[in-house]
Image (spheres, grey):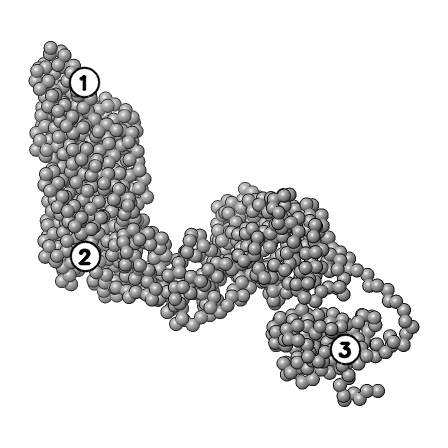
């Protein structure tokens, strides 16, 4: 008997020193001749059990243990499965590593003793040929069951089914279906596989590669190949040792076969590549949470969340509700799930088990829950658990980035903002974002802009709660600094009334360069939702400096682009915050910004009050630039409240202050507004001169926005003085500039003015189209004054084309809007148009009342040209109602006013009216008056030229 204290002698199949990173080349399989319960098997199982216990206690995977001991993972797996014999070197190394004394070494001795005894017994038996072990049964299909409730994905499914068409390619067909956790990748390929199964008679294999399986490391391709080879009938004893040999055998056995192979939950191209058959008759479907970019020859099929209609169908089906179920509640439920199939499945499952639950109430409760992710959990399935696996698979620096993305208050982010948020260089931010995109943890809806799915955003935000408060605060502060600084840079190019920012923000380490208005406008348009979200974030987290600075930097952009209701809310909060923070400079600026937007929305009274408050604050502070801006704004407001005399005084004061301060931008704006006051009071020559001075200043300064506005003003004056050709040219220049600059308000105004010119020259179709475009833009902006003016102009076109009912309806809408706004000149114009419509409908009494009311309003606001227009229409009314003498007197009054304000079109209208009144009794006088009218019509290119000329020819023929 051997001495039990001494180590038993080593046999030939137990080398002392196996090469590192490999299994012992000649270690034998555990013999099975003594039966499943024999002593050798029992000893091997005892060794395996202790090895598993020690590894589990150390929280190591098989791969981790193999790497530490210098063996392959495959060898450790076989040891634990008792399909490979333990060796003394392995036992000693493991004991030393685990610090387990000689626990494994003693178990190896027991195994070795049992195995030696078994060999002696076998040698004493009569020699005979052992019967060959039967080959394992080959499997035909290992597909999981089909998804009974599979819904939607028709396009993606069709693409996969087409992949099976014969002769599509001379190489193997490989399709990778990638997408975020819970998006339905496995469900799609499983459903497709069942539909394709009949086309692949040589078998269907489904293999889980465990890239994201709780408690398991990714599958070793060598082990997967062993399973696959055994499944097609290869005996375990005949399996090659190396990965390369197993892959070659797999490809060889599938040569010429038609097999469908699904590789689910893949970790990387390196894991997938050895498993691919070589036969072009095979189809391989791979699913992964990563984009397997490096997998040569694969056709990628990125899987997004479900479209809303498909998501609703899936929810209704799984919740076991009828198709006529409250559509609004279903739509909201799937929206709250982010249209993610896993989330929809789990939420619908809860509802399915409660048929008495009301869907609307259920959805409302889910919408108001504080933790949606905790609600999306059923049994061992949970959305958060799926996200956990993706997150845990990230490197620490990527986990840091993912968590910080949850701090971002806006809908998306670019590399610059990411660099600021995470405090890393721009190049690193770009690379890390790309990695998260590759892993389907973020989306890239447009180039270089990334966003989190709603549920992933909530998950990331939950993770940030484990970070120190200071870390979160510093990250948010860096982000707000970046957005504020860049918005202030953009505002430098956008603001038509430049002023120093009260809270200038230092540049971040990686600052985005904005070198011109186009770049500034493009950045503002892109980042607008993020800037608003940051502003609301600062409101909720009591960060007044950032809130005030953001509102100030966004003021010019919001004025020009809207939406104005959003601007009103933002500036109101900024003014209130500045007041409570004892920051009067910022309060005055915020009040002024708020007033300017109120002005644009037609709240002229409110705008005037706010401009007055801002002016008083600036005066108290001795802030002369602020006073000049507030005076200028006050003058603009008074223009639209019909106080033309009152409008001129503050505008002149503003002009003087701007000149004293050397602020040429301000001078140009003030000159332009003084010109508008002159135009409104009938001094068209003076208006043109001032607008021309403003235009020159704007061009000298390179202020293209100011240039566009001045061109519009000049075009308006040219139109009023009868130079329709010049008016059209100037207005088209203004329109092109506004479009180039992206100024939608200026574009809308230019379209409206150009429509007026087209109407006056007889192009009614063109006028209608341009005015409709203007109306839509004003509606988009929320500009009610612009809407009212466009409705009135459309009514004029309808009236001239014979649609009197349509004209009356549009003029009525314009009147109501102008009344709401308190705009008396607008009301006068609308009443005038309604009167003209009633004349055409021969409702002379109604027409007379409307025209009288219109003339009174024009007289009250001092609009002489407006009075002339109404008098001409009143003359037409009197003439058509059989009162030619009164009509003649009225036309003569109109002629005097028209010549007073030098309005050639109104002059020509009055002369033509006079001629028509004179014709029945004094043809010669009528011809004289009409020749004057025709000459003016021809000179200005008016639409009335043809009809007036024809009438003149008729009178001259009668005279002859």
State the residue at coordinates (12%, 35%).
864
On the image, numbered disc 2 is attached to which residue? 614
Residue 2, position as x, y percentages in the image: 81, 87
Would residue 313 be visible to someone looking at this image? Answer: no
Quadrant (top left, top right, bottom left, bottom right) of the C terminus? top left
User: In the image, which is nearer the foreground, mark 2 or mark 1?
Assistant: 1
Q: Position of residue 124 (x, y in %)?
A: 90, 77
Q: Which residue is mark 1?
A: 950
- Residue at image location 69% in from the left, 45% down from the top: 198
Q: Tell me the quarter of the picture where residue 854 sits.
A: top left
Q: Residues within 10 Å of mark 3 (few under 14, many from 20)?
A: few
Mark 2 crowdedness (10 Å alpha carbons): few <14, some 14-19, many ≥20 = many
Side (left or right) of 911 relative to 54: left
Q: Picture quarter containing residue 730?
A: top left
Residue 199 vs 249, above or below: the answer is above
Question: What distance separates the C-alpha of mark 2 from that of mark 1?
Answer: 59 Å
Tell which of 921 and 902 is nearer to you: 902
Residue of label 3: 12
Q: CA distance from mark 1 to mark 3?
A: 124 Å
Q: Is residue 83 left or right of residue 119?
A: left
**Is 326 in front, or is 199?**
199
């Amino acid at each position: 008997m051997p001495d039990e204290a001494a180590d038993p002698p080593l046999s030939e199949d137990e080398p002392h020193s196996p090469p590192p990173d490999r299994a012992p080349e000649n270690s034998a399989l555990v013999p099975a001749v003594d039966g499943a319960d024999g002593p050798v098997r029992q000893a091997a199982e005892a060794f395996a059990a202790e090895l598993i216990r020690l590894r589990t206690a150390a929280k190591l995977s098989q791969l981790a243990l193999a790497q530490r001991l210098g063996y392959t993972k495959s060898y450790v797996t076989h040891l634990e499965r008792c399909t490979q014999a333990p060796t003394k070197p392995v036992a000693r190394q493991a004991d030393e590593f685990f610090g387990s004394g000689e626990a494994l070494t003693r178990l190896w001795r027991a195994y070795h003793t049992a195995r030696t005894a078994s060999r002696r017994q076998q040698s004493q038996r009569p020699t005979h040929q052992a019967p060959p072990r039967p080959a394992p049964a080959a499997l035909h299909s290992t597909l999981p069951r089909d998804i009974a409730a599979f819904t939607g994905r028709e396009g993606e499914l069709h693409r996969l089914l087409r992949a099976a068409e014969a002769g599509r390619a001379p190489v193997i067909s490989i399709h990778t279906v990638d997408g975020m956790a819970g998006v339905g990748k496995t469900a799609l390929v499983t459903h497709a596989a069942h539909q394709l199964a009949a086309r692949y008679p040589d078998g269907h294999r489904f293999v889980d590669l465990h890239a994201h399986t709780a408690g398991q490391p990714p599958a070793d391709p060598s082990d997967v190949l062993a399973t696959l080879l055994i499944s097609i009938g290869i005996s375990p004893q005949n399996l090659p040792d190396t990965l390369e040999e197993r892959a070659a055998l797999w490809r060889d056995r599938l040569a010429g076969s038609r097999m469908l192979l699904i590789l689910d939950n893949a970790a990387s191209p390196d894991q997938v590549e050895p498993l691919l058959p070589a036969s072009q008759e095979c189809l391989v479907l791979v699913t992964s949470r990563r984009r397997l970019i490096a997998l040569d020859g694969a056709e990628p099929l990125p899987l997004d969340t479900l479209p809303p209609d498909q998501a609703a169908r899936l929810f209704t089906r799984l919740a076991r509700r009828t198709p006529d179920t409250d559509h609004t509640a279903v739509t909201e439920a799937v929206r709250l799930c982010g249209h993610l199939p896993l989330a929809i499945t789990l939420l619908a499952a809860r509802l399915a088990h409660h048929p008495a639950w009301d869907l609307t109430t259920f959805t409302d409760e889910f919408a108001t829950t504080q933790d949606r992710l905790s609600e999306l959990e059923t049994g061992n399935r949970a959305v958060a658990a799926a996200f956990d696996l993706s997150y845990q698979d990230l490197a620490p620096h990527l986990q840091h980035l993912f968590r910080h993305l949850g701090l971002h208050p806006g809908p998306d982010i670019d590399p610059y903002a990411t660099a600021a948020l995470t405090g890393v260089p721009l190049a690193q931010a770009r690379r890390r974002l790309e990695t998260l995109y590759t892993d389907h943890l973020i989306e890239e809806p447009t180039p270089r802009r990334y966003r989190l799915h709603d549920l992933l955003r909530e998950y990331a935000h939950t993770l940030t709660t484990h970070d120190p408060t200071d870390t979160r605060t510093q990250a948010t502060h860096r982000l707000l600094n970046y957005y504020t600084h860049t918005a202030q840079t953009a505002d430098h190019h956008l603001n038509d009334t430049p002023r120093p920012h009260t809270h200038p923000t230092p540049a971040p380490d990686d600052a985005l360069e904005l070198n011109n208005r186009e770049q500034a406008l493009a950045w503002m348009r892109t980042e607008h939702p993020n800037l608003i979200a940051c502003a609301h974030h600062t409101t909720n987290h009591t960060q007044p400096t950032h809130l005030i600075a953001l509102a100030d930097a966004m003021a010019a952009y919001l004025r020009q682009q809207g939406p104005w209701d959003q601007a009103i809310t933002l500036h109101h909060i900024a003014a209130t915050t500045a007041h409570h923070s004892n920051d009067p400079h910022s309060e005055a600026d915020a009040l002024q910004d708020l007033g300017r937007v109120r002005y644009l929305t037609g709240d002229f009274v409110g705008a005037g009050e706010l401009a007055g408050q801002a002016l008083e604050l600036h005066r108290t502070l001795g802030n002369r630039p602020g006073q000049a801006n507030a005076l200028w704004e006050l003058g603009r407001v008074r223009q639209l409240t019909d106080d033309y005399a009152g409008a001129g005084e503050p505008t002149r004061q503003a002009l003087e202050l701007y000149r004293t301060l050397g602020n040429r931008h301000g001078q140009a704006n003030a000159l332009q507004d003084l010109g508008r006051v002159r135009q409104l009071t009938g001094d068209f020559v003076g208006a043109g001169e001032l607008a021309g001075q403003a235009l020159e200043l704007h061009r000298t300064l390179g202020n293209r926005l100011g240039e566009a506005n001045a061109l519009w003003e000049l075009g308006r004056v040219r139109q009023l003085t009868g130079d329709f050709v010049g008016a059209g040219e100037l207005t088209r220049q203004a329109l092109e500039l506004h479009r180039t600059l992206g100024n939608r308000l200026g574009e809308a105004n230019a379209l409206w003015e150009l429509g007026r010119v087209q109407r006056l020259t007889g192009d009614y179709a063109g006028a209608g189209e341009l005015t409709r475009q203007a109306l839509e833009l004003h509606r988009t902006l929320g500009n009610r004054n612009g809407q009212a003016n466009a409705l009135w102009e459309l009514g004029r076109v309808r009236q001239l084309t014979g649609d009197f009912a349509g004209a009356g309806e549009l003029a009525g809408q314009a009147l109501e809007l102008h009344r709401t706004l308190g705009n008396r000149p607008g009301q006068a114009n609308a009443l005038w148009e309604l009167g003209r419509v009633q004349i055409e409908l021969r409702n002379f009494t109604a027409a007379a009342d409307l025209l009288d009311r219109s003339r009174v309003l024009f007289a009250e606001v001092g609009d002489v040209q407006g009075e002339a227009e109404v008098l001409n229409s009143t003359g037409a009314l009197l003439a058509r109602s059989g009162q030619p003498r009164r009509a003649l007197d009225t036309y003569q009054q109109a002629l005097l006013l028209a010549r007073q304000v030098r309005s050639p079109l109104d002059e020509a209208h009055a002369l033509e009216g006079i001629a028509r009144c004179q014709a029945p009794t004094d043809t010669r006088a009528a011809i004289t008056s009409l020749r004057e009218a025709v000459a003016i019509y021809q000179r200005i290119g008016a639409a009335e030229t043809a009809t007036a000329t024809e009438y003149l020819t008729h009178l001259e023929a009668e005279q002859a």
